[in-house]
Image (tube, rainbow, N blue to C red):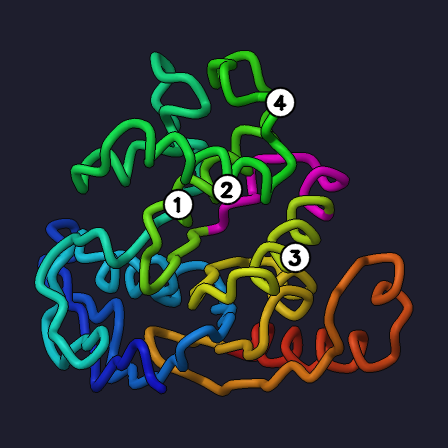
Amino acid sequence: MKTLTLRNLAKTYFDPYAGAHVNAVQDVSLEVEQGEFVSVVGPSGCGKTTILNMIAGFIPYSGGEILLNGKPIDGPGPERGVVFQSFALFPWKTVLDNVGFGPKMRGVPKAERDKIAYEYLALAGLSHAANRYPNELSGGMQQRVGVVRALANHPDVLLMDEPFASVDAQTRMTLQEELTRIWQERRPTVIFITHDVPEAVFLANRVVVLSKGRVLDQVEVDLPRPRVWNDLIEDDNFKRLSSQVLHMVRSA
């Protein structure tokens, strides 16, 4: 079952310095199945984040269409959860209340939304941090809160814009492993934007490579799950897929 459909999607900006229109995204078509994990990679300026922001409803598209469960997207909505590069937590709210914010906005009573929040915090191994504030957490813990906060609102699609870019390499690998574990348990539909080719391959069922605002190619990732770095770092299939995707990105 297809959750998300992009058909001939385009985005044009007016560049006041050049005095001309710029095509940031050109004729992008993509189908994402329910429960699929899709990574999107490509060189800087290829349109990755622009596409994610159009799916999120943050910016309008100039041409084509985006359908979610067969319905056009025309603005932000709770059926699309977003995890940003920055932690984007409410500093005045506890971790519990941060995770329960989405259900609160949908009118879920406090007892029920606290139950939902505790469930997702347990999923991320953060039950002990429920009553802490964001500034009392490490960067990695804050980003885990950001991920489960988005999931707690039960979105049809989880949109992730380079969410691990601001943490150190060791923490990043741990977060990648935790994300794959959470995805296996709950099977949300995920679109994950990244510059990091090994990260894209490690996480995804399919990697979409962009070039100059277009889909250059797509690579199916048939690596077994669960995925942990100790098993994959020297795996020949993982190396082959990463090399294949990297070659595409560098030639884009």
Amino acid type assigned to the residue bearing label 1 in the image: Ala
Q: Earlier in the sequence, mark 3 or mark 2?
A: 2
Q: Residue at x 40, y 77 (%)?
A: 34
Can you give x and y, in whole percent of width and height, for residue 152 in the image? 39, 45
- Specify few, some or many for label 2: CA neighbours under 10 Å numbering under 14, 14-19, or 20 or more: many
Q: In front here: 97 or 179?
A: 97
The numbered dot on residue 33 is none
How far apart marks 3 and 1 lie (CA) works out to: 16 Å
Can you give x and y, in whole percent of width and height, for residue 164 in the image? 57, 44
The residue identified by callout 3 is 181
The residue identified by callout 2 is 120
Q: Earlier in the sequence, mark 3 or mark 1?
A: 1
How far apart marks 4 and 1 lie (CA) works out to: 17 Å
Q: In front here: 218 or 81?
A: 81
* Secondary element at image label 3: helix
User: Magenta part of the protein: which range?
Assistant: 162-173
* Secondary element at image label 1: helix
| Mark whose residue sits in front, 3 or 2 | 2
Q: Earlier in the sequence, mark 2 or mark 1?
A: 2
Answer whether residue 148 is magenta in the image. Answer: no
The residue identified by callout 1 is 152
Amino acid type assigned to the residue bearing label 2 in the image: Tyr
Q: Which residue is drawn at 33% across and 74% down?
A: 213
How far apart marks 3 and 2 lie (CA) works out to: 13 Å
The residue identified by callout 4 is 128
* Secondary element at image label 2: helix
Q: Is residue 150 above or below residue 242?
A: above
Can you give x and y, in whole percent of width and height, for residue 215 in the image? 40, 82
